Image: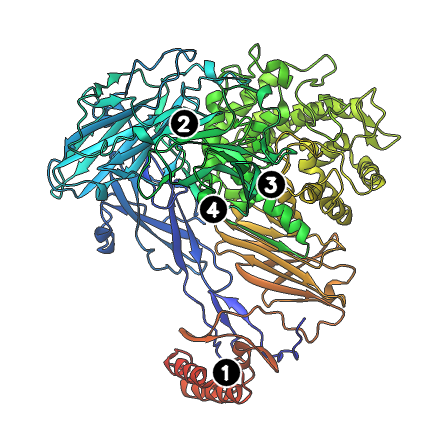
């Protein structure tokens, strides 16, 4: 910890109108305000979306500034047909005018109706807390998609056959469809609108369209299907062109039998497509190309087989060179046939596409049997392998993927046959075409979960790069950072991120191997962890739409979304999930609430309020005569098997939470009558719950008939606010005692684990929480690492089915929200709360996450001498509430950044109110000589950036502070002489060099300080 002599008492900086300025009696401030700029313009939460079909898209932006205390008090949005028009001040489409509000996210476009397939340009400026307008942002844009059926210009659904044949029939190869067309003139712009179901890969003039994979994302096709939009301007030629599309089955036409009945989905069909190509010419006229019966189709292509739960078969001898180029001889092809389409509404895909995000070269290659090679990637991934091989035509190479090896060193996929009736599991088969110079191939329509690839049939011994892993996932941005003094904790965090990415493939899945299903419980349990780590805004909104599609008129929800019908009442799966399943169905409540709390999105609550109410009414119909809810899966996958307490306590607790949240949502949405009714119902459930499960004398909760202490039975009442105040201490004490009695081990399944560490931490037992989090004996996250795992397991024990699950990844929430202490104090981080909890065994931790307002960060560290330091960052257009842990000291032993307003002591924390910016606090025995003001990036002299990096100097905090030292100047000339003297001293002390000396003096001369006085 660095120490400095006390600052001169005359150095009192006051934040006024965005300037760090001294009082009127003091010299003018040298560090003037940096400019506020408007950045990161987004439409529907995406930068420059190509084809949104939102009729009133929502607009967002963020502010950037070097200075503290920045707030937006108003905005103005302008929308025009071109960026040039905006630069000329012509907003002919829409001008919002000055709107007095601090809102900067999810502002609905309120201009005239938008045209389909059109690019709109927009810009924003804001007014700051002093009422001063910023400069206009740089122009950005969005393009609309297709709003209604007429916008498709008659494009038809087409396929190779009628499209509704039975899955029991012969499995056909992947169909190819092609069409030749003329551009109709010079090409200024071209857009392809394509829905190829299940998945599609398009080519124009021999070039692949786009870089995404497994497009479009799968849905409940009976309600919704997606199309994607591509900028294909550079792929078209003036004159003759050709388009070719190959279709994979995906989840649209699964033909193999499985436990979830995908092969009998109500939408089941062979692959089909709908396509519209719009070519815009320099004069503004357009030429359209549509899918219809003029297209030609063939099933003689190289992709002979593709099934989601099997793999692909590709015969390179059957490749059709030039098939997507003009002039190809397709006389042997057949006319495409009209098909029925999916039945659901066709929408622009609203969330990020799946992309290949990493190529991994194996860390080891073994040969467990002669001619059989096993490639080890070193980590668990979801995706596939890319094969590079040379050999004779007709040579067949198989690649079998798995998460583990058997005792003989071969890939094994235990229990796969328990769920699937398939000819092979997670296996691709490639037949060489005998091409000179070798061949490179990778699958297009199926992904697998794996670390190991077992390869048979190679014509020659391989190199490591013969097989490379191709990691795929929904390509949302990474926005989280976490680092600590515990390598184990950091590794757990890394494994959690890996598990999340591997299981976010358009929807939040449970495992990339066995199910690939959107279990709602998994989604809700890790939703906040995911939101701290990644930009989940578009993904979670899209998944909420999937949940809405799956909800029946009665309010009932399935446990997997999308679903082919599995787990509805009376349907297959209902007995397996012991429906209803409140802890899983909570996804409909948790995701909108997270969007509201994390992003300030009231619309998310509005959109799903009715669905929440309908579900709760349906659940209420299942309450038993005692007022309890004996349904659901309970604390799934607790150590030792099915928990003896059953689901009744957990489900009743979740029913209470639903009622409470419904009351709060109703209040937010201005529905006071329902708010009162739901609050009353929550009170009834609470009273019934405590009457049934609370043992007041023992100070714990238990299910009648179960004598064994159960951690989750006590965690949930504490987490949900069910425990009467007078019993909280006893319930907490018994929970801690049970954990410590087990050697600091948990005894929770996925539901209890979600809340365990936060409950311990927020009830004053951070050391116990930390001991559980860093435990390395079974059951624990650390135990999995001891086993050599690089992701998260499905079960706590070593003998688990899946090594690539994410629902135990809720520990990530605790790292960000409790260990680092980052939470929104107001919706959308309009106010930021930083309240870290400090375990005895950890010397530092830091975390940051990008919010709708900018980065929020918390960094704390303590030395071995009892000194503690906290640095907190609050983004522009937000305020902060910083809770500084006193750790046994007093508020008088806290040194705080200037302008941090002391608000009192609460529960062992000194609380400060701050504006935007970075703030530093030090807790020490003696704070008199501690410099706490964070250094600005560069020395600012009035309105001039010197370009000299600000840094700590002997005798004062920073160069800026040295310049601001007590001095006597009354105008610009004296100020320049003062800076010259200080710079000369700094150069003499070796703090700056000659170049920096010249820069400081020059900046002072150019500055506005002292002019006109």
- Quarter-wise, where is residue 186 in the image? top left
User: Mark 2 = which residue?
Assistant: 313
Q: Compare marks 4 and 2 and give the one earlier in the sequence.
A: 2
- Image quarter where the N terminus lies is bottom right
- Quarter-wise, where is residue 889 in the image? bottom right
In the structure shown, which secondary structural element does the residue marked by tag 4 occupy? loop
Residues marked 3 and 2 touching at CB (< 8 Å): no
Q: Compare marks 4 and 3 and give the one earlier in the sequence.
A: 4
Q: Residue at x 72, y 26 (%)?
A: 686
Label 4 to label 2, Cα distance in Å?
A: 23 Å
Q: Residues within 10 Å of mark 1 (few under 14, many from 20)?
A: many
User: Mark 3 = which residue?
Assistant: 791
Residues marked 1 and 3 touching at CB (< 8 Å): no
Tell me if residue 608 comes above or below residue 791 in the rendering. Answer: above
Q: Nearer the viewer, mark 4 or mark 2?
A: 4
User: Mark 1 = which residue?
Assistant: 992
Q: Compare marks 1 and 2 and give the one earlier in the sequence.
A: 2
């Amino acid at each position: 910890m660095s120490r400095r002599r006390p600052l001169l008492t005359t150095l009192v900086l006051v934040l006024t109108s965005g300037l760090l300025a001294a009082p009127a009696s003091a010299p003018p401030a040298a560090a003037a305000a940096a400019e506020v700029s408007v950045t990161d313009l987004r439409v529907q939460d995406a930068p420059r979306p190509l084809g949104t079909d939102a009729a009133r898209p929502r607009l967002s932006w963020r502010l950037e500034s070097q200075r503290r205390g920045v707030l937006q008090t108003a905005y103005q949005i302008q929308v025009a047909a071109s960026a040039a028009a905006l630069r000329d001040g012509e907003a002919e489409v829409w001008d919002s005018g000055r709107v007095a509000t601090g809102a900067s996210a999810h502002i609905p476009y309120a201009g005239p109706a938008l045209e389909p397939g059109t690019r709109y340009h927009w810009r924003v400026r804001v007014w700051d807390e002093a009422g001063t307008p910023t400069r206009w942002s740089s122009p950005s844009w969005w393009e609309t998609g297709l709003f209604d059926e007429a916008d498709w210009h008659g494009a038809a659904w087409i396929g190779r056959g009628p499209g509704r044949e039975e899955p029991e029939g012969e499995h056909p190869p992947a169909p190819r469809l092609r069409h030749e067309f003329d551009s109709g003139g010079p090409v200024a712009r071209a857009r392809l609108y394509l829905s190829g179901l299940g998945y599609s890969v398009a080519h124009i003039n021999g070039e692949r369209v786009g870089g995404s994979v497994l497009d479009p994302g799968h849905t409940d096709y009976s309600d919704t299907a997606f199309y994607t939009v591509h900028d294909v301007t550079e792929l078209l030629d003036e004159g003759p062109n050709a388009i070719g599309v190959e279709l994979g089955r995906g989840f649209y036409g699964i033909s193999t039998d499985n436990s979830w009945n995908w092969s009998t989905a109500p939408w089941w069909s062979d692959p089909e497509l709908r396509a519209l190509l719009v070519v815009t010419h320099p004069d503004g006229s357009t030429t359209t190309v549509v899918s219809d019966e003029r297209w030609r189709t063939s099933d003689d292509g190289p992709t002979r087989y593709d099934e989601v739960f099997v793999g692909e078969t590709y015969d390179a001898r059957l490749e059709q060179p030039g098939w997507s180029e003009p002039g190809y001889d397709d006389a042997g092809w057949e006319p495409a046939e009209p098909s029925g389409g999916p039945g659901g509404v066709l929408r622009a895909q609203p969330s990020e596409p799946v992309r290949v995000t990493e190529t991994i070269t194996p860390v080891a290659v073994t040969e467990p049997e002669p001619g059989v090679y096993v490639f080890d990637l070193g980590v668990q991934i979801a995706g596939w392998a890319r094969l590079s091989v040379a050999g004779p035509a007709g040579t067949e190479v198989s690649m079998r993927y798995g998460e583990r090896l058997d005792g003989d060193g071969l890939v094994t996929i235990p229990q796969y046959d328990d769920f699937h009736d398939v000819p092979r599991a997670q296996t691709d088969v490639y037949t060489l075409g005998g091409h000179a110079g070798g061949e490179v191939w990778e699958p297009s329509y199926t992904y697998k979960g794996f670390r190991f690839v077992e390869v048979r049939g190679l014509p020659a011994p391989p190199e490591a790069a013969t097989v490379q892993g191709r990691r795929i996932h929904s390509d949302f941005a990474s926005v989280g950072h976490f680092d600590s003094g515990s390598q184990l904790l950091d590794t757990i965090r890394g494994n959690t991120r890996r598990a999340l990415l591997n299981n976010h493939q358009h929807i939040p899945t449970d495992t990339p191997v066995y199910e690939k299903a959107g279990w709602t419980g998994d989604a809700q349990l890790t939703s906040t962890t995911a939101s701290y780590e990644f930009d989940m805004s578009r993904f979670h909104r899209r998944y909420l739409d999937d949940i809405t599609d799956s909800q029946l008129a009665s309010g009932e929800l399935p446990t997997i979304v999308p679903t082919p019908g599995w787990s509805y009442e009376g349907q297959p799966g209902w007995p397996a999930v012991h429906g209803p399943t409140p802890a899983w169905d909570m996804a409909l409540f948790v995701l909108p609430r997270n969007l509201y709390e994390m992003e300030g999105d009231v619309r998310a609550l509005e959109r799903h309020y009715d669905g929440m109410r309908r579900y709760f009414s349906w659940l209420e119909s299942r309450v038993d005569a005692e007022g309890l809810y004996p349904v659901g899966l309970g604390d799934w996958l607790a150590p030792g098997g099915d928990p003896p307490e059953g689901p009744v306590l957990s489900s009743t607790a979740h029913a209470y939470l639903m009622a409470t949240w419904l009351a709060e949502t109703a209040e937010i949405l201005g529905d006071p009558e329902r708010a009162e009714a739901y609050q009353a119902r929550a009170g009834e459930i609470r009273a019934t719950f405590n009457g049934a499960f609370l043992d007041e004398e023992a100070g714990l909760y238990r299910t009648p008939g179960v004598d064994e202490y159960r951690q989750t039975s006590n965690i949930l009442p504490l987490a949900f606010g069910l425990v009467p105040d007078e019993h909280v201490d006893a319930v907490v004490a018994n929970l801690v005692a049970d954990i410590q009695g087990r050697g600091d081990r948990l005894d929770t399944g996925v539901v209890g684990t979600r809340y365990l560490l936060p409950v311990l931490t927020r009830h004053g037992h951070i050391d116990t929480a930390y001991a559980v989090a860093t435990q390395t004996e079974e059951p624990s996250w650390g135990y999995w690492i001891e086993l050599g795992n690089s992701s998260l397991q499905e079960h706590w024990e070593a003998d688990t089915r899946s090594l690539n699950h994410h629902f135990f990844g809720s520990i990530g929430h605790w790292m960000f929200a409790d260990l680092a202490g980052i939470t929104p104090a107001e919706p959308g981080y309009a106010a930021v709360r930083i309240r870290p909890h400090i375990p005895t065994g950890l010397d530092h931790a830091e975390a940051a996450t990008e919010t709708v307002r900018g980065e929020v960060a918390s960094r704390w560290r303590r030395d071995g001498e009892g000194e503690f330091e906290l640095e907190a960052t609050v983004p522009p257009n937000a305020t902060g509430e910083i809770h500084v842990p006193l750790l046994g000291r007093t508020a008088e032993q806290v040194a705080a950044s200037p302008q941090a307003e002391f608000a009192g002591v609460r529960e062992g924390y000194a609380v400060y109110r701050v504006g935007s910016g970075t703030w530093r606090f030090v807790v020490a025995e003696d704070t008199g000589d501690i410099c706490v003001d964070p250094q600005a990036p560069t020395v600012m002299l009035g309105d001039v950036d010197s370009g000299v990096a600000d840094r700590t100097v002997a005798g004062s905090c920073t160069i800026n502070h040295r310049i601001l030292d007590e001095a006597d100047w009354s105008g610009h000339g004296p100020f320049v002489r003062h800076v010259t003297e200080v710079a000369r001293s700094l150069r003499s002390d070796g703090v700056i060099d000659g170049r920096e000396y010249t820069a400081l003096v020059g900046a002072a001369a150019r500055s506005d300080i002292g002019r006109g006085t």
